[in-house]
């Protein structure tokens, strides 16, 4: 009788084949490794609130008197030209009337919530900017 030969090799597991990775996989791994070493610089997205001419945001609108409540992030005075920009709002006007606690004032300071007479309808969340070419 002839001796029976074993088909298994020493150290190999049944059903597991060791294959060499394809060139495509090797390239993908190298690209990922390179990107982790030096992350690309992200483009800085400047939001409207970070711009220098951002004055404040509309918090309420009174349609019967055409007035908006604006939370100020910068000072605002009578005679300044403002630009109101929102989802459906976009107009420019000169400030003619400012009130604080129902009393007329000549200028609003940072942090105050003022009443501002507007010529057109505004909505909560609309942003108020200083129009270019004006200073306060």
Image (cartoon, rainbow, N blue to C red):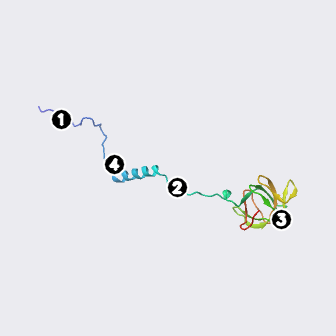
Query: Which mark is on residue 5?
Result: 1
Estimate how packed mark 2 is, as few (under 14), some (14 to 19) or many (20 or more) residues with alpha carbons within 10 Å.
few
C-alpha separation, residue under disc 2 versus residue under disc 3? 45 Å
Vertical comparison of 14 with 30: above or below: above
Determine the residue positioned at 52% across, 55% down.
41
Taking depth in this image into account, of 53 and 119 the one nearest to the observer is 53
For marks 2 and 3, the one nearer the N-term is: 2
Look at the numbered discs 2 and 1 and tell me whether their residues touch, using CB distance below 8 Å. Answer: no
Indicate which label's residue lies in the foreground, 4 or 3. 3
Mark 4 neighbour class, 10 Å CA radius: few under 14, some 14 to 19, many 20 or more: few
Residues at discs 2 and 3 in contact (Cβ within 8 Å):
no
Residue 75 in picture, x, y percent from top left: 77, 57
Toward the viewer: 92 or 23? 92
Name which of mark 2 and mark 1 comes first in the sequence: 1
Per the model, the C-alpha gap separating discs 4 and 3 is 74 Å
Do labels 3 and 1 touch, CB within 8 Å? Answer: no
Q: Quadrant of the C terminus?
A: bottom right
Residue bearing the label numbered 2? 41
Q: Looking at the image, which residue is at 68% across and 57% down?
A: 49
Residue located beneath label 3 in the image:
96
């Amino acid at each position: 009788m002839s001796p029976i030969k074993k088909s298994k090799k020493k150290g190999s597991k049944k059903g597991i084949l060791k294959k060499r990775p394809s060139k495509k996989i090797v390239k993908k791994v190298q690209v990922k490794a390179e990107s982790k070493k030096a992350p690309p610089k992200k483009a800085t997205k400047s939001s409207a609130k970070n711009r220098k001419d951002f004055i404040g945001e509309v918090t309420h609108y009174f349609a019967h008197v055409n007035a908006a409540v604006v939370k100020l992030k910068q000072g605002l005075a009578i005679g300044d030209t403002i630009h109101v920009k929102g989802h459906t709002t976009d107009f420019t006007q000169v400030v003619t009337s400012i009130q604080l606690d129902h009393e007329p004032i000549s200028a609003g300071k940072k942090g105050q919530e003022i009443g501002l007479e507007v010529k057109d309808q505004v909505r909560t969340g609309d942003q108020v900017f200083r129009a270019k070419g004006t200073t306060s």
